[in-house]
């Protein structure tokens, strides 16, 4: 039933925990893990880039490479893709245009005013993905 899993990662702690879950699930199901990282575009990305002084393309590539390497070490077949744009839109588009059975994504678990101001990538994916979505809450 679940043979093609899409892991969305941005390299955050929540994404690393989602990666662990995705690798375990792929192992149990003998599934392929599609690793997707999105180089962010838009106002929130510009604010993040200004604060952290990082290159979004490098950040996305590093996140994807780390997840792929972890999957490979675990003996899981993995592919990677880097996209540019709004993360939730690109993740849903990937799920719609590729044969994936499930999306796996980490969530920071924000609530209240912080959630209202920044929104939730995971929430948008859950609302719009054409397949089931496994959300993994950051436990750190």
Image (tube, helix red, strand yellow):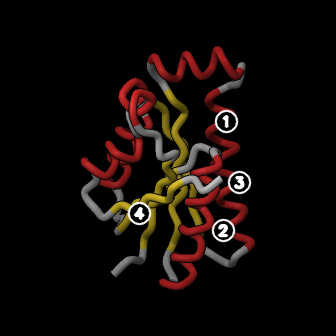
- At horizontal 65% and vertical 49% (from top left) the residue drawn is 13
> What residue is pinned by disc 4?
134
First in sequence, mark 4 or 3: give its number: 3
Q: Secondary structure at mark 1?
A: helix
First in sequence, mark 2 or 4: give its number: 2
Which image quadrant is residue 78 in? Answer: bottom right
Label 2, label 4: how far apart the Cα atoms are: 18 Å
Q: Nearer the viewer, mark 1 or mark 4?
A: 4
> What residue is pinned by disc 1?
59
Looking at the picture, how far across and down is residue 117, in whole percent?
40, 24
99 with respect to 26 (left or right): left
Labelled disc at residue 66: 3
Q: Secondary structure at mark 2?
A: helix
Labelled disc at residue 100: none
Question: What is the crowding at mark 2: few (fewer than 14 residues within 10 Å), some, or many (at least 20)?
Answer: many
> What residue is pinned by disc 2?
71
First in sequence, mark 1 or 4: give its number: 1
Which image quadrant is residue 87 in? Answer: top left
Check if mark 2's residue and mark 3's residue have beta carbons within 8 Å.
no
- At horizontal 34% and vertical 45% (from top left) the residue drawn is 123
- At horizontal 36% and vertical 60% (from top left) the residue drawn is 133
Q: Nearer the viewer, mark 2 or mark 4?
A: 4
Which image quadrant is residue 119 in? Answer: top left
Question: What is the crowding at mark 1: few (fewer than 14 residues within 10 Å), some, or many (at least 20)?
Answer: some
Label 1, label 4: how far apart the Cα atoms are: 23 Å
Locate the N terminus by quadrant.
bottom left
């Amino acid at each position: 039933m679940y043979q093609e899993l899409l892991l969305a990662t941005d390299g955050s702690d929540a994404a690393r925990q989602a990666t662990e879950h995705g690798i375990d699930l792929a192992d149990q199901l003998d599934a392929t893990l599609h690793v997707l990282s999105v180089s962010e575009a838009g106002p929130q990305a510009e604010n993040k880039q200004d604060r952290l002084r990082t290159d979004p393309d490098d950040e996305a590539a590093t996140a994807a490479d780390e997840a792929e390497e972890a999957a490979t070490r675990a003996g899981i077949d993995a592919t990677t893709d880097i996209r540019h744009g709004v993360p939730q839109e690109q993740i849903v588009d990937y799920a719609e245009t590729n044969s994936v059975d499930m999306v796996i994504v980490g969530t920071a678990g924000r609530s209240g005013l912080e959630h209202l101001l920044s929104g939730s990538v995971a929430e948008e994916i859950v609302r719009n993905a054409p397949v089931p979505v496994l959300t993994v809450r950051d436990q750190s």
